[in-house]
Image: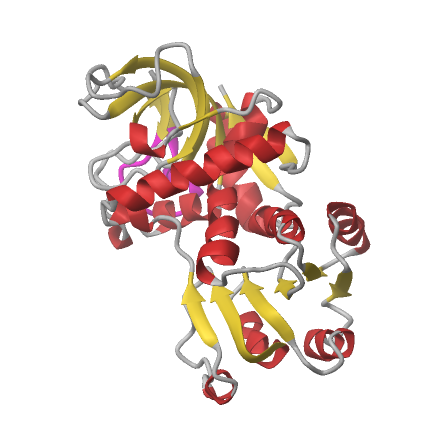
Amino acid sequence: MKAVYFEAGGAIDVLQYGDMEAPDKCRSTQVLVRVKAIGINPIDTKIRAAPERFPVSFSVIPGCDGAGIVQAVGNQVKNFKPGDAVYFSQPGFNQRQGTYAEYVMVDASLLALKPHSLSFEQAAAAPLVLITAWEALHDRARITGGQTVLIHAGAGGVGHVAIQLAKLAGARVITTVSNAEKAGFVKRLGADQIIHYPTQDVIAEVLQYTDDKGVDIAFDTVGANVLQSCFSCVKPYGDVVTILQPTKDTDWGEARKRNVRFSFELMLSPVLMELDDAKCHQADILRQCAALFEQGRLTVEIAQTFDLSNAAEAQHYLEQNHPTGKLVMTL
């Protein structure tokens, strides 16, 4: 099969495109998927740059997100059959293979049927950001209707999905963007207040919008100084959720004073730690989101599409730019 792989970590030039042996025998709870499209995520570049930080085995085929057609199923798999169109997010950890390939073996517990209304490209773009945003807002922050939510980098992969999920939950949304084009994009998604962070003081704008009360939930998708600012934007007893590792110089004083509930969101944990119930929960999130896609209440934005053979170019583009929505590869 054609695949993208690397034999050692480093810059994008370590990525190779060529022939590798295809997986051919399903374990009892696995499904063999012929990949039609692949979603590209920042974690892909982090694994390539520093594979020693992750439980991967060389040769490493990167990639978490995929959409494709079921080719074969294990003898204990009851919910899927050959010919089903599916979408999923499965990092290539613990002897698994990533999705930058023509075929991939996937844990059946992580799969969901692809929404009929989405192309394979759209479906492949969605899983990791859907699960991340859903877990952050619903599972970590316990979002409810009538709350006010601050979502940083609202035009990004996670951010643009989080805006929609927050609005569907009945919340008011404040979000940050870097330019007018992205401001127009997040406005179309339903954002109530848009902050142009290069020229506006985010904390001051948030406090003005909330009558100095602060937001109920602050969702950090950027890290470092952005996480630090969240502590001054959230109301006492509010929630701050981050998808990044806080820096060593993070000052927790304001968070402690406000008695903030602080949460991490790492959607990789179920596969990383082999948590079976959590894997099933993530597939259930994809099923619930599939219904929202079918109803036209949820969308995923594709910024640019690449061929699998140009994976190095795609990762370079992701590292050098801040695309609106997601990048996707096709085969």
Residue nearest the observer in this picture, 60 or 87: 87
Q: Is residue 267 left or right of residue 191?
A: left
- The x and y percentages for residue 253 are 47, 88
- The x and y percentages for residue 68 are 45, 20
Task: Look at the picture and state if 220 lies above or below 228.
Answer: above
Residue positioned 50% across, 41% down in the render:
315
Position of the N terminus by quadrant: top left
Task: Look at the picture and state if 173 lies above or below 162.
Answer: below
Tell me which segment is drawn in magenta.
5-16
- The x and y percentages for residue 130 are 52, 43
Residue 84 found in image quarter:
top left
Residue nearest the observer in this picture, 102 or 148: 148
Residue 126 can be seen in this image? no
Residue 171 found in image quarter:
bottom right
Residue positioned 35% across, 36% down in the render:
90
Q: Is residue 196 left or right of residue 59?
A: right
